[in-house]
Amino acid sequence: MSTLKHNWTREEVTALYNKPLISLIFEAGTMHRQYFNPEEVQVSSLLSIKTGGCPEDCAYCPQAARYQTEVAVHKLLDKETVLQKAKEAQSEGASRFCMGAAWREVRDNRDFDKVLDMVKDVNALGMEVCCTLGMLSESQAKRLKEAGLFAYNHNLDTSEEFYGDIISTRTYQDRMDTLQNVRKAGLTVCCGGIIGMGESENDRIALLQNLANQLPHPESVPINALISVDGTPLQEQEKVPVWDMVRTIAVAKILMPASMIRLSAGRVNMTAAEQALCFLAGANSIFAGDKLLTTPNPSFVGDQELFAHLGLQPMEAFCSQKVVENSTKNA
Ligand code: SAM
Ligand code: DTB
Ligand code: SF4
């Protein structure tokens, strides 16, 4: 097994990104097999617990209040509804349940207390619990950890250079600060980005370099293909070619071989064969369920067929062994 590296140069990442795809997939697949069982895919389920009305201006996001989209806005769901959804997801094979809120940041108020309660109860079901709630202080991260949170999702989204073209209401450094607070609280980190927003290849390379130079590497790395939603500034963006998704996943896997690379938003626009290429390139995690946060995702039955065709099995919850290995190797 190779040792994990956290000082990747721009030249090294560029050279990887420009490799012939056929060899890149093989290299990434070979790395992947050193760290993971290639027949296992982690299945996560997403639920938007608070939808729309967000004060931020992320150009890709249908939940920003300032854009006219068709998202049905709702305030924080009650715990019973959330628990019911978690149980359904678990019965459909999900080992991780991720709750998302359209907040700029967490505030120390009653809504946060309610989220802490949800975390406690979903954890008691034996699922890995993840949250994505926006910016977070260290003490808030600690409270989430104490409530039983397993992972926190906070994406870098793109390169620092391109970030300002996509979001003006917060900075790249704000994102990095939250990630550090999450780490300090002993939570695992889920951090990735989006491709297909009009960024250059250099922006993708810079994003991958920034992800891979974190110490330790994020335990899970979601790679999202932009879902262009009517009403958002990115509504006219064309669908990102599948080759770009496969290439980005393969490079992410080679840079962070012990991390789970999640084939995230965009599966709904991909064929089974295209998704198979992503798994061959080292993706070993997906979001399942017919909705992501607000946009469509492949159906449960469709994913069952996909898994059956490829001989894939859903991963068990609490892969603590891998997480421990990952953290010690990263140290
Ligand atoms: N409000 C919190 C935040 O921004 O961190 C949490 C929820 S936010 C919707 C989580 C992530 O979803 C974003 O960082 C972005 O990477 C991804 N995302 C949002 N809209 C997307 C879209 N239209 N296509 C692909 N990914 C998207
Ligand atoms: C991530 O990287 N992708 C997920 C999850 N983390 C929270 C969200 C995708 C959202 C796609 C747009 C929507 O459904 O609103
Ligand atoms: Fe708000 Fe998150 Fe959407 Fe940005 S990505 S507008 S912070 S919900």
Image (cartoon, rainbow, N blue to C red):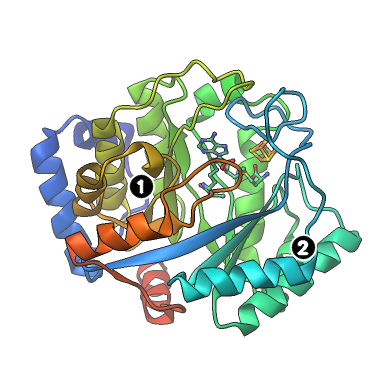
Q: Amino acid at mark 1?
A: Asn
Q: What percent of the width, then of the height, locates residue 230?
A: 59, 22
Locate the N terminus and report the quarter of the image it occupies: bottom left
Q: Secondary structure at mark 1?
A: loop
> Mark 2 packing: few (<14 Cα in 10 Å), some, or many (20+)?
some
Residue 112 in the image: state x and y as whole percent: 82, 61
Quadrant observed for ligand 1 in the rendered image: top right
Answer yes or no: is residue 191 visible. Answer: yes
Residue 161, placed above or below residue 156: above
Q: Give me the residue at 73% from left, 39% from top.
A: 72
Neighbour class for label 1 at 10 Å: few (<14), some, many (≥20)? few
Q: Quadrant of residue 23?
A: top left
* Marking on residue 140: 2
Q: Is residue 258 toward the left or the right of residue 109 in the image?
A: left
The residue singled out by tag 1 in the image is 7
Residue at 25%, 37% (x, y): give it.
Answer: 247
Q: Amino acid at mark 2?
A: Gln
Residue 237 position in % (x across, y down): 46, 18
Distance CA(mark 1)–CA(mark 2): 30 Å
Given residues 170 and 60, the one toward you in this image is: 60
